[in-house]
């Protein structure tokens, strides 16, 4: 059983990392300060440096958590054999992440646009290995006639770009939606449309298996 000190550490680290996502998304790594993070987290600046020695340490943890969350969302590839179910679950998870954690997605996008100075090693190892495994799954579905032949790598990139658009370009969506954030009902409709669109790219729909032609 965890003692009170461990529980307090977990609570405060979670608050700090959540605040850091927001600050890094708004100001970028270079513009963000631990002072800003402490204000958003509503914790003394000394506490920030107690749990994380430097801003770089916080940034590393934020990016690591984002990557782990995205990889968790892809467990549908492992948990469901039928491609229509696996892809639907994966897309829904990605859309929900964009809905509830837009700041995290923006932090990741900003890091990549800067040339991935921090996560470059992750891309070369962890993410690359993860991607190759999913490409093999998709290729297996293609070889067994379960989905239409496509470039598996490009197909995954398509899923990423469509789902993450709802986080990275959230402000643009609000402007084009007459200044209103999508309601839960509207977002559910968009999610359904994205699922249908992506499945159609490989000859699938949610209720049926591969439909050739």
Image: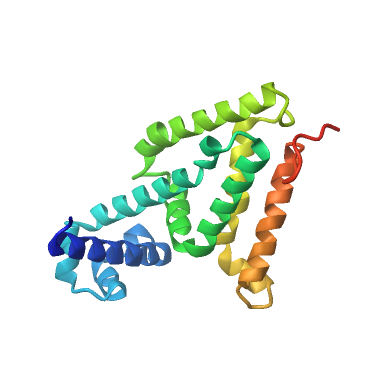
Q: Is residue 158 visible?
A: no
Q: Is residue 149 visible?
A: yes
Q: Residue furthest top?
A: 143
Q: Residue furthest front?
A: 1
Q: Residue at x 54, y 58 (%)?
A: 96
x and y percentages locating residue 113 in the rendered image: 47, 49
Q: Residue at x 60, y 41 (%)?
A: 86
Image quadrant where one finds the N terminus: bottom left
Q: Residue at x 57, y 38 (%)?
A: 80
x and y percentages locating residue 87 in the rendered image: 62, 42
State which quadrant residue 8 falls in: bottom left
x and y percentages locating residue 74 in the rendered image: 51, 42
Left or right? Give the position of 158 relative to 66.
right
Q: How many marks?
A: 0
Q: Residue furthest right?
A: 213
Give the answer, above or below, for where 8 lies relative to 63.
Answer: below
For the residue pair 141 and 123, the one nearer the viewer reads as: 141
Give the answer, above or below, for where 188 lies relative to 161.
Answer: below
Give the answer, above or below, for where 131 lies relative to 101.
Answer: above
Q: Residue at x 36, y 67 (%)?
A: 23
Image quadrant where one finds the C terminus: top right
Give the answer, above or below, for where 147 lies relative to 158.
Answer: above
Q: How is the image coloured?
A: rainbow
x and y percentages locating residue 112 in the rendered image: 45, 47
């Amino acid at each position: 059983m965890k003692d009170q000190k461990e529980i307090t550490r977990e609570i405060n680290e979670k608050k700090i990392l959540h605040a850091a996502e927001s600050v890094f998304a708004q100001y970028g790594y270079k513009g963000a300060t631990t002072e800003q993070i402490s204000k958003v987290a509503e914790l003394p600046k000394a506490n920030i440096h107690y749990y994380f020695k430097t801003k770089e340490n916080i940034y590393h943890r934020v990016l690591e958590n984002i990557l782990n969350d995205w990889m968790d969302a892809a467990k549908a590839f492992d948990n469901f054999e039928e491609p229509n179910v696996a892809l639907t679950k994966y897309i829904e998870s990605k859309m929900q992440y964009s809905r509830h954690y837009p700041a995290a997605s923006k932090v990741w996008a900003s890091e990549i646009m800067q040339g991935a100075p921090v996560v470059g090693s992750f891309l070369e190892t962890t993410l690359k290995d993860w991607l190759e495994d999913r490409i093999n799954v998709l290729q297996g579905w293609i070889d067994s006639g379960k989905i239409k032949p496509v470039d598996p790598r490009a197909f995954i990139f398509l899923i990423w770009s469509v789902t993450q658009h709802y986080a990275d370009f959230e402000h643009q969506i609000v402007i084009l939606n007459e200044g209103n954030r999508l309601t839960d009902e509207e977002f559910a409709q968009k999610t359904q449309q994205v699922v249908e669109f992506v499945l159609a790219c490989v000859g699938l729909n949610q209720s049926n298996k591969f439909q050739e032609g």
